[in-house]
Protein backbone atom coordinates (compact mmCIF):
# COMPACT_ATOMS: atom_id res chain seq x y z
CA UNK A 1 0.00 0.00 0.00
CA UNK A 2 1.15 3.54 -0.76
CA UNK A 3 0.02 6.92 0.54
CA UNK A 4 -1.90 8.52 -2.31
CA UNK A 5 -3.82 11.82 -2.47
CA UNK A 6 -7.34 11.44 -3.85
CA UNK A 7 -10.57 13.42 -3.99
CA UNK A 8 -14.02 11.89 -3.53
CA UNK A 9 -15.90 15.07 -4.44
CA UNK A 10 -15.27 18.53 -5.81
CA UNK A 11 -14.62 21.34 -3.35
CA UNK A 12 -12.07 23.38 -1.45
CA UNK A 13 -8.67 22.11 -0.34
CA UNK A 14 -10.24 20.02 2.44
CA UNK A 15 -11.43 17.45 -0.15
CA UNK A 16 -7.80 16.37 -0.70
CA UNK A 17 -7.40 13.14 1.28
CA UNK A 18 -4.27 11.05 1.85
CA UNK A 19 -5.29 7.38 1.68
CA UNK A 20 -3.58 3.99 1.62
CA UNK A 21 -4.00 2.67 -1.92
CA UNK A 22 -2.63 -0.39 -3.70
CA UNK A 23 -0.87 0.93 -6.80
CA UNK A 24 -0.85 -1.65 -9.60
CA UNK A 25 2.17 -2.58 -11.68
CA UNK A 26 2.83 -0.24 -14.59
CA UNK A 27 1.21 -0.90 -17.96
CA UNK A 28 3.40 -2.03 -20.85
CA UNK A 29 4.18 1.55 -21.92
CA UNK A 30 4.53 3.03 -18.42
CA UNK A 31 7.22 3.66 -15.83
CA UNK A 32 6.52 3.39 -12.12
CA UNK A 33 8.33 6.00 -10.05
CA UNK A 34 8.83 6.49 -6.34
CA UNK A 35 7.85 10.13 -6.05
CA UNK A 36 10.27 12.44 -4.21
CA UNK A 37 8.75 15.82 -5.11
CA UNK A 38 5.58 17.13 -6.76
CA UNK A 39 5.07 20.41 -8.63
CA UNK A 40 1.74 22.05 -7.78
CA UNK A 41 -0.17 23.81 -10.56
CA UNK A 42 -3.30 25.95 -10.79
CA UNK A 43 -4.69 23.33 -13.16
CA UNK A 44 -4.95 20.93 -10.21
CA UNK A 45 -6.73 23.54 -8.13
CA UNK A 46 -9.18 24.07 -10.99
CA UNK A 47 -9.68 20.30 -11.36
CA UNK A 48 -10.37 20.01 -7.63
CA UNK A 49 -12.84 22.91 -7.88
CA UNK A 50 -14.70 21.44 -10.89
CA UNK A 51 -13.48 24.33 -13.06
CA UNK A 52 -11.19 22.37 -15.39
CA UNK A 53 -11.43 20.90 -18.88
CA UNK A 54 -11.51 17.33 -17.52
CA UNK A 55 -14.20 15.70 -15.38
CA UNK A 56 -13.23 13.55 -12.40
CA UNK A 57 -14.34 9.97 -11.86
CA UNK A 58 -14.43 9.57 -8.09
CA UNK A 59 -12.40 8.61 -6.21
CA UNK A 60 -9.87 10.44 -8.34
CA UNK A 61 -6.13 10.91 -8.25
CA UNK A 62 -4.72 14.20 -9.51
CA UNK A 63 -1.43 15.83 -10.30
CA UNK A 64 0.63 16.65 -13.38
CA UNK A 65 4.25 16.96 -12.28
CA UNK A 66 6.68 14.86 -10.27
CA UNK A 67 10.30 13.85 -9.88
CA UNK A 68 11.61 10.70 -8.27
CA UNK A 69 13.35 7.41 -8.93
CA UNK A 70 12.42 4.51 -11.18
CA UNK A 71 10.86 1.56 -9.34
CA UNK A 72 10.05 -0.64 -12.32
CA UNK A 73 9.11 -0.36 -15.98
CA UNK A 74 6.44 -1.81 -18.22
CA UNK A 75 7.07 -4.72 -20.58
CA UNK A 76 7.58 -2.53 -23.66
CA UNK A 77 9.77 0.11 -22.02
CA UNK A 78 13.52 0.36 -22.56
CA UNK A 79 16.11 2.92 -21.59
CA UNK A 80 15.30 3.22 -17.88
CA UNK A 81 16.80 1.31 -14.96
CA UNK A 82 15.69 0.83 -11.38
CA UNK A 83 16.87 3.66 -9.14
CA UNK A 84 17.49 6.22 -11.89
CA UNK A 85 16.48 9.80 -11.11
CA UNK A 86 13.76 11.03 -13.47
CA UNK A 87 11.13 13.72 -13.82
CA UNK A 88 7.79 13.83 -15.63
CA UNK A 89 6.57 15.99 -18.47
CA UNK A 90 2.88 16.45 -17.57
CA UNK A 91 0.68 13.95 -19.45
CA UNK A 92 -2.67 14.69 -21.06
CA UNK A 93 -4.81 13.16 -18.30
CA UNK A 94 -4.59 14.80 -14.87
CA UNK A 95 -6.27 11.87 -13.10
CA UNK A 96 -5.20 8.69 -14.91
CA UNK A 97 -1.53 9.46 -14.28
CA UNK A 98 -2.00 11.48 -11.10
CA UNK A 99 1.28 12.26 -9.37
CA UNK A 100 0.09 13.24 -5.88
CA UNK A 101 1.37 10.43 -3.68
CA UNK A 102 4.29 8.17 -2.91
CA UNK A 103 4.10 6.13 -6.12
CA UNK A 104 2.90 6.94 -9.64
CA UNK A 105 2.63 5.06 -12.93
CA UNK A 106 3.33 7.46 -15.80
CA UNK A 107 3.76 7.29 -19.61
CA UNK A 108 7.32 6.32 -20.52
CA UNK A 109 7.46 8.79 -23.45
CA UNK A 110 7.07 11.64 -20.96
CA UNK A 111 9.72 10.51 -18.48
CA UNK A 112 13.02 12.40 -18.67
CA UNK A 113 16.42 11.80 -17.11
CA UNK A 114 16.94 15.38 -15.98
CA UNK A 115 20.40 16.91 -15.45
CA UNK A 116 22.06 15.50 -12.34
CA UNK A 117 22.67 18.97 -10.91
CA UNK A 118 18.94 19.46 -10.34
CA UNK A 119 17.43 18.57 -6.97
CA UNK A 120 14.21 16.55 -6.99
CA UNK A 121 12.37 19.70 -5.90
CA UNK A 122 13.77 21.66 -8.86
CA UNK A 123 13.12 18.81 -11.30
CA UNK A 124 9.49 18.65 -10.20
CA UNK A 125 9.17 22.35 -11.04
CA UNK A 126 10.55 22.16 -14.59
CA UNK A 127 8.34 20.68 -17.22
CA UNK A 128 4.91 22.30 -17.07
CA UNK A 129 6.31 25.80 -17.05
CA UNK A 130 9.11 25.38 -19.56
CA UNK A 131 7.20 23.26 -22.09
CA UNK A 132 4.27 25.69 -21.92
CA UNK A 133 6.47 28.75 -22.46
CA UNK A 134 8.71 27.10 -25.07
CA UNK A 135 5.75 25.85 -27.12
CA UNK A 136 4.17 29.28 -27.27
CA UNK A 137 7.23 31.47 -27.69
CA UNK A 138 9.66 29.34 -29.71
CA UNK A 139 7.60 26.68 -31.48
CA UNK A 140 4.64 28.85 -32.42
CA UNK A 141 5.64 32.54 -32.25
CA UNK A 142 9.21 31.91 -33.53
CA UNK A 143 10.52 34.39 -30.97
CA UNK A 144 14.07 35.40 -31.70
CA UNK A 145 16.86 37.96 -31.65
CA UNK A 146 15.60 41.55 -31.52
CA UNK A 147 11.96 40.67 -30.74
CA UNK A 148 9.99 42.28 -27.92
CA UNK A 149 7.61 40.03 -25.97
CA UNK A 150 4.98 41.10 -23.44
CA UNK A 151 4.55 38.53 -20.65
CA UNK A 152 1.45 38.99 -18.49
CA UNK A 153 0.83 37.31 -15.12
CA UNK A 154 4.57 37.65 -15.01
CA UNK A 155 5.14 36.33 -11.49
CA UNK A 156 3.63 32.93 -12.35
CA UNK A 157 5.91 29.96 -12.96
CA UNK A 158 5.17 30.10 -16.70
CA UNK A 159 5.86 33.84 -16.70
CA UNK A 160 9.26 33.36 -15.08
CA UNK A 161 10.02 30.51 -17.51
CA UNK A 162 9.12 32.82 -20.40
CA UNK A 163 11.68 35.38 -19.19
CA UNK A 164 14.47 32.81 -19.27
CA UNK A 165 13.48 31.31 -22.62
CA UNK A 166 13.16 34.76 -24.21
CA UNK A 167 16.65 35.64 -23.00
CA UNK A 168 18.01 32.36 -24.41
CA UNK A 169 16.84 33.34 -27.91
CA UNK A 170 17.86 37.00 -27.65
CA UNK A 171 14.45 38.63 -27.16
CA UNK A 172 13.56 41.51 -24.83
CA UNK A 173 10.97 40.88 -22.11
CA UNK A 174 8.32 43.40 -21.06
CA UNK A 175 6.64 41.97 -17.95
CA UNK A 176 3.29 43.22 -16.67
CA UNK A 177 2.04 43.20 -13.11
CA UNK A 178 -0.83 45.00 -11.39
CA UNK A 179 1.22 47.18 -9.04
CA UNK A 180 4.83 48.22 -8.68
CA UNK A 181 5.42 46.15 -5.55
CA UNK A 182 6.95 43.29 -7.55
CA UNK A 183 8.88 45.44 -10.01
CA UNK A 184 12.34 44.76 -8.60
CA UNK A 185 11.62 41.08 -7.99
CA UNK A 186 10.56 40.64 -11.62
CA UNK A 187 13.62 42.51 -12.86
CA UNK A 188 15.78 40.30 -10.66
CA UNK A 189 14.00 37.25 -12.13
CA UNK A 190 14.97 38.23 -15.67
CA UNK A 191 12.52 40.77 -17.08
CA UNK A 192 14.14 43.63 -18.99
CA UNK A 193 11.23 46.01 -18.33
CA UNK A 194 8.24 45.93 -15.97
CA UNK A 195 4.95 47.78 -16.48
CA UNK A 196 2.56 48.11 -13.51
CA UNK A 197 -0.74 48.16 -15.40
CA UNK A 198 -2.72 49.52 -12.45
CA UNK A 199 -0.40 52.52 -12.20
CA UNK A 200 0.95 53.06 -15.71
CA UNK A 201 -0.45 53.27 -19.24
CA UNK A 202 0.52 49.96 -20.84
CA UNK A 203 0.30 51.14 -24.43
CA UNK A 204 2.33 54.29 -23.80
CA UNK A 205 5.03 52.42 -21.87
CA UNK A 206 5.37 49.67 -24.47
CA UNK A 207 5.60 52.19 -27.28
CA UNK A 208 8.26 54.08 -25.33
CA UNK A 209 10.27 50.89 -24.73
CA UNK A 210 9.98 49.73 -28.35
CA UNK A 211 10.56 53.15 -29.97
CA UNK A 212 7.00 53.15 -31.25
CA UNK A 213 7.10 49.75 -32.94
CA UNK A 214 5.17 47.73 -30.37
CA UNK A 215 5.80 44.16 -29.21
CA UNK A 216 5.68 41.40 -31.83
CA UNK A 217 4.69 38.69 -29.34
CA UNK A 218 2.33 38.61 -26.35
CA UNK A 219 2.01 35.65 -23.96
CA UNK A 220 -1.17 35.98 -21.90
CA UNK A 221 -3.10 33.65 -19.54
CA UNK A 222 -5.53 36.34 -18.36
CA UNK A 223 -7.90 37.52 -21.09
CA UNK A 224 -10.71 39.86 -20.08
CA UNK A 225 -10.60 43.65 -20.46
CA UNK A 226 -6.80 43.70 -20.74
CA UNK A 227 -7.09 42.24 -24.25
CA UNK A 228 -7.67 45.63 -25.83
CA UNK A 229 -4.62 47.46 -24.41
CA UNK A 230 -2.47 44.40 -25.08
CA UNK A 231 -3.36 44.32 -28.77
CA UNK A 232 -2.95 48.10 -28.97
CA UNK A 233 0.60 47.57 -27.68
CA UNK A 234 1.51 45.09 -30.42
CA UNK A 235 3.57 45.49 -33.54
CA UNK A 236 2.16 45.11 -37.04
CA UNK A 237 1.97 41.41 -37.91
CA UNK A 238 2.33 40.41 -34.27
CA UNK A 239 0.95 37.34 -32.54
CA UNK A 240 -0.84 37.03 -29.20
CA UNK A 241 -0.94 33.57 -27.63
CA UNK A 242 -3.76 33.11 -25.11
CA UNK A 243 -3.19 30.15 -22.81
CA UNK A 244 -5.63 30.81 -19.95
CA UNK A 245 -8.70 32.64 -18.71
CA UNK A 246 -7.70 33.98 -15.30
CA UNK A 247 -9.77 37.16 -15.59
CA UNK A 248 -13.21 35.57 -15.47
CA UNK A 249 -14.61 38.68 -17.17
CA UNK A 250 -15.75 38.85 -20.81
CA UNK A 251 -12.92 39.24 -23.30
CA UNK A 252 -13.73 41.89 -25.94
CA UNK A 253 -12.59 41.28 -29.49
CA UNK A 254 -10.22 44.15 -30.42
CA UNK A 255 -11.43 44.44 -33.99
CA UNK A 256 -9.66 47.61 -35.09
CA UNK A 257 -6.27 46.62 -33.65
CA UNK A 258 -6.53 43.19 -35.26
CA UNK A 259 -7.53 44.61 -38.63
CA UNK A 260 -5.23 47.63 -38.56
CA UNK A 261 -2.14 45.67 -37.59
CA UNK A 262 -2.90 42.30 -39.25
CA UNK A 263 -2.57 40.59 -35.87
CA UNK A 264 -2.83 36.88 -35.12
CA UNK A 265 -4.71 35.90 -31.95
CA UNK A 266 -4.23 32.22 -31.10
CA UNK A 267 -5.58 30.03 -28.37
CA UNK A 268 -2.75 27.84 -27.14
CA UNK A 269 -2.72 24.71 -25.02
CA UNK A 270 0.27 22.90 -23.55
CA UNK A 271 -1.22 19.69 -24.95
CA UNK A 272 -0.36 20.84 -28.49
CA UNK A 273 3.27 20.10 -27.71
CA UNK A 274 2.80 16.97 -25.58
CA UNK A 275 0.61 15.27 -28.20
CA UNK A 276 3.15 15.85 -31.01
CA UNK A 277 6.20 13.57 -30.75
CA UNK A 278 8.42 15.72 -32.97
CA UNK A 279 7.54 18.96 -31.14
CA UNK A 280 8.00 17.21 -27.81
CA UNK A 281 11.49 16.05 -28.81
CA UNK A 282 12.39 19.63 -29.79
CA UNK A 283 11.08 20.89 -26.45
CA UNK A 284 13.07 18.29 -24.48
CA UNK A 285 16.29 19.13 -26.33
CA UNK A 286 15.92 22.89 -25.83
CA UNK A 287 14.95 22.64 -22.16
CA UNK A 288 17.57 20.06 -21.17
CA UNK A 289 20.25 22.16 -22.89
CA UNK A 290 19.04 25.23 -20.99
CA UNK A 291 19.01 23.39 -17.68
CA UNK A 292 22.52 22.04 -18.27
CA UNK A 293 23.89 25.47 -19.16
CA UNK A 294 22.12 27.21 -16.29
CA UNK A 295 20.16 29.49 -18.63
CA UNK A 296 17.00 27.81 -17.33
CA UNK A 297 16.70 27.62 -13.55
CA UNK A 298 13.33 26.86 -11.91
CA UNK A 299 12.43 29.16 -9.05
CA UNK A 300 10.65 27.64 -6.05
CA UNK A 301 8.43 29.92 -4.01
CA UNK A 302 7.72 27.51 -1.16
CA UNK A 303 7.83 23.82 -0.29
CA UNK A 304 5.37 21.76 1.74
CA UNK A 305 5.34 18.15 2.94
CA UNK A 306 2.89 15.62 1.50
CA UNK A 307 1.00 15.71 4.80
CA UNK A 308 0.44 19.43 4.18
CA UNK A 309 -1.00 19.00 0.66
CA UNK A 310 -4.14 20.91 1.66
CA UNK A 311 -2.01 23.81 2.89
CA UNK A 312 -0.04 23.78 -0.38
CA UNK A 313 -3.27 24.20 -2.35
CA UNK A 314 -4.49 26.94 -0.02
CA UNK A 315 -1.19 28.78 -0.36
CA UNK A 316 -1.33 28.62 -4.15
CA UNK A 317 -4.89 29.92 -4.17
CA UNK A 318 -4.36 32.76 -1.72
CA UNK A 319 -0.90 34.02 -2.68
CA UNK A 320 0.40 35.69 -5.81
CA UNK A 321 3.82 34.18 -5.21
CA UNK A 322 6.82 34.44 -7.46
CA UNK A 323 7.81 30.93 -8.46
CA UNK A 324 6.57 27.38 -8.07
CA UNK A 325 4.93 25.64 -5.13
CA UNK A 326 6.48 22.20 -4.53
CA UNK A 327 5.49 19.31 -2.24
CA UNK A 328 8.17 16.91 -0.96
CA UNK A 329 7.33 13.25 -0.35
Image: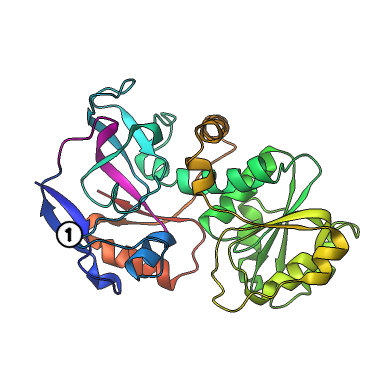
Q: Is 87 on the left or on the right of 187, as rendered?
A: left
Please state which of residues 270 and 305 is positioned toward the viewer in this rendering: 270
Where residue 265 sits in the image (x, y, percent)?
70, 59
Can residue 150 be found in the magenta stretch? no
| Residue sitting at x 59%, y 44% | 135
Q: Quadrant of residue 91?
A: top left
Where residue 194 sits in the image (x, y, percent)?
71, 62
Where residue 264 sits in the image (x, y, percent)?
74, 56
User: Vertical placement of 216 versus 140: above or below?
Assistant: below
Density class for disc 1 (Cα within 10 Å; few <14, some 14-19, many ≥20) is some
Residue 28 showing in the rendered view:
yes
The colour scheme applied to this rendered structure is rainbow
Q: Is 207 on the left or on the right of 38, as rendered?
A: right
Total numbered circles:
1
Q: Which residues are magenta?
A: 24-41
Main SS of the magenta part reads: strand
User: Vertical placement of 136 versus 57: above or below?
Assistant: above
The residue that disc 1 covers is: 18
| Residue sitting at x 79%, y 58% | 263
| Element type at mark 1 | strand
| Residue sitting at x 13%, y 57% | 19
Q: Is 71 on the left or on the right of 48, as rendered?
A: left
| Residue sitting at x 63%, y 58% | 186
Q: Quadrant of residue 191?
A: bottom right
- Residue lying furthest right: 212
Please state which of residues 87 and 115 is positioned toward the viewer in this rendering: 87
Where residue 227 sits in the image (x, y, percent)?
70, 70
Q: Is 306 on the left or on the right of 66, as rendered?
A: left
Residue 205 showing in the rendered view:
no
Amino acid sequence: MSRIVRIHEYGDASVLKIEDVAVPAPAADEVQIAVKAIGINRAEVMFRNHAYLQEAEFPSRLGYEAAGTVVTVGADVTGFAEGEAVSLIPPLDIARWGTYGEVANVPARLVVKHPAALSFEEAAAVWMQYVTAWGALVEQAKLGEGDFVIVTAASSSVGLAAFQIARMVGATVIATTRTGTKRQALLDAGAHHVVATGEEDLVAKVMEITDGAGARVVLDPVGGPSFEPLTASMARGGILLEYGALSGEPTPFPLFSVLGKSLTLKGYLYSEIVSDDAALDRAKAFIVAGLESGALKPRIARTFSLDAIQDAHRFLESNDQIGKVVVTV
